Image (spheres, rainbow, N blue to C red):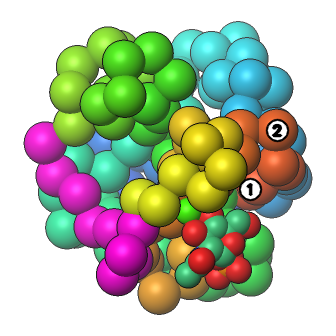
Amino acid sequence: KALIFTIGKEVGSKLFVTDGLEYDYETARRVCSRAGGLVAAPRTADENHALQEIVSKHDKRAFLGITDIQIGTFQYSTGETITYTNWYPSEPNNIKGAEYCVELRSDGKWNDIICTKKKLLICEF
Ligand code: GN1
Ligand code: CA
């Protein structure tokens, strides 16, 4: 828990932790999973705000653990349909029909992007 002072944030019972590095989405999933966590997915405005602070600090947009690879509906990596959203205006726009992942911008808003792009890793525990 002490690590959150340098590499993450605590919101309620959730810990968000970053290694400061960028990976494609599948690698991000693997790295978080190996550590016993999931790619971070904000379920409230408070959680979104904590993730925004991490993104701003590192000046790198982060992947969220949210995709529409499977059924055209955005889902958490647990398979549940998302409840909270914070899309940037006109997003998700699914450019070229190929944007199945979601990035968090430094303004806290979400954009759908291609999963093979490399984005900041933030895991939740
Ligand atoms: C554009 O350039 P950026 O990151 O602000 C696009 C997004 C795409 C993204 C792909 C208004 O966003 O929808 O996902 O490029 N924004 C607009 O890198 O077209
Ligand atoms: Ca987009």
State the image coordinates of residue 39 (x, y, percent, origin top left).
Answer: 54, 34
Q: Quadrant of residue 47?
A: bottom left
Kind of residue sitting beneath label 2: Thr
The quarter of the picture where residue 95 lies is: bottom right
Q: Main secondary structure of the magenta part?
A: loop
Depth check, front residue: 22 or 125: 22
Which residue appears at 67% of the width and 50% of the height? 96
88 falls in the magenta region: yes
Name which quarter of the figure residue 89 lies in: bottom left
Q: Is residue 62 left or right of residue 120?
A: left
Dot 1 alpha-carbon crowd within 10 angstroms: few under 14, some 14 to 19, many 20 or more: many
Residue carrying label 2: 116
In the image, residue 71 sits, relative to residue 48, either above or below, namely above
Task: Measure the alpha-carbon separation of dots 1 and 2.
Answer: 13 Å
The answer, for residue 68, to whether it is visible in the render is yes
Q: Is residue 13 above or below residue 109?
A: above
Nearer to us of marks 1 and 2 is: 2
Ligand 2 in which quarter = bottom right
Count of numbered badges drawn on the protein: 2
State the extent of the magenta-drawn residues as a range.
Answer: 83-91
Helix, strand or loop at mark 1: strand
Relative side of 28 to 116, left or right:
left
Residue drawn at point x = 19 percent, y = 67 percent: 45
- Against 30, residue 38 (above or below) is below
Residue type highlighted by circle 1:
Leu
Residue 122 is left or right of residue 94, and the answer is right
- Specify the label residue 120 is tagged with: 1
